[in-house]
Amino acid sequence: MIVFTGSADATICAWDMELSDLKGVLRGHFRAVMSLCLCEKYPILVSASKDNDLRVWHVDTFECLRVVTGRIGCVMAL
């Protein structure tokens, strides 16, 4: 099982809970990551940050698929 954590250093870490191992670090945000939402239907993770952006990530490759740049301010929850 992979668990994703957001951090004040603007990164998202992917942890393998069975091995207690860091699988990858997702970089792209410029300020603290405030919220994460894992999609049940598709292999994507959505992150929200104090940089006012939402990012869509592929959970297998850790690639950023899309950036939604907001003029709505900081998103605190998804």
Image (cartoon, helix red, strand yellow):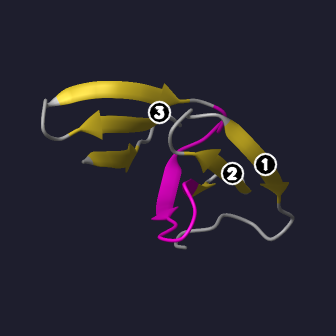
Q: Which residues are magenta?
A: 28-45
Instruction: Give the secondary structure at mark 3.
Output: loop
Residue shown at the point (55%, 73%) measured from the top left: 78
Give the residue at x 53% y 37%. Answer: 10
Q: Position of residue 12 (x, y in %)?
A: 46, 39
Verify CB contact (< 8 Å) between mark 1 and mark 2.
Answer: yes
- Mark number displayed over residue 55: 2
Q: Which mark is residue 50?
A: none
Which residue is identified by label 1?
66
Which of the two marks, 3 or 2, is nearer to us in this view? Answer: 2
Q: Nearer the viewer, residue 25 or 71?
A: 25
Q: Residue 34 in magenta? A: yes
The mark closer to the camera, 1 or 3, is 1
Q: Residue furthest front?
A: 41
Residue 71 image offset from top left, x and y in percent: 87, 65
In three-dimensional space, the C-alpha distance between marks 1 and 3, rounded to whole angstroms, equals 20 Å
Which residue is the site of mark 3?
Answer: 9
**Residue flagged by tag 3: what amino acid is it?**
Asp
10 Å crowding of disc 3: few (<14), some (14-19), many (20+): few
Q: Residue at x 49, y 61 (%)?
A: 35
Q: Quadrant of residue 8?
A: top left
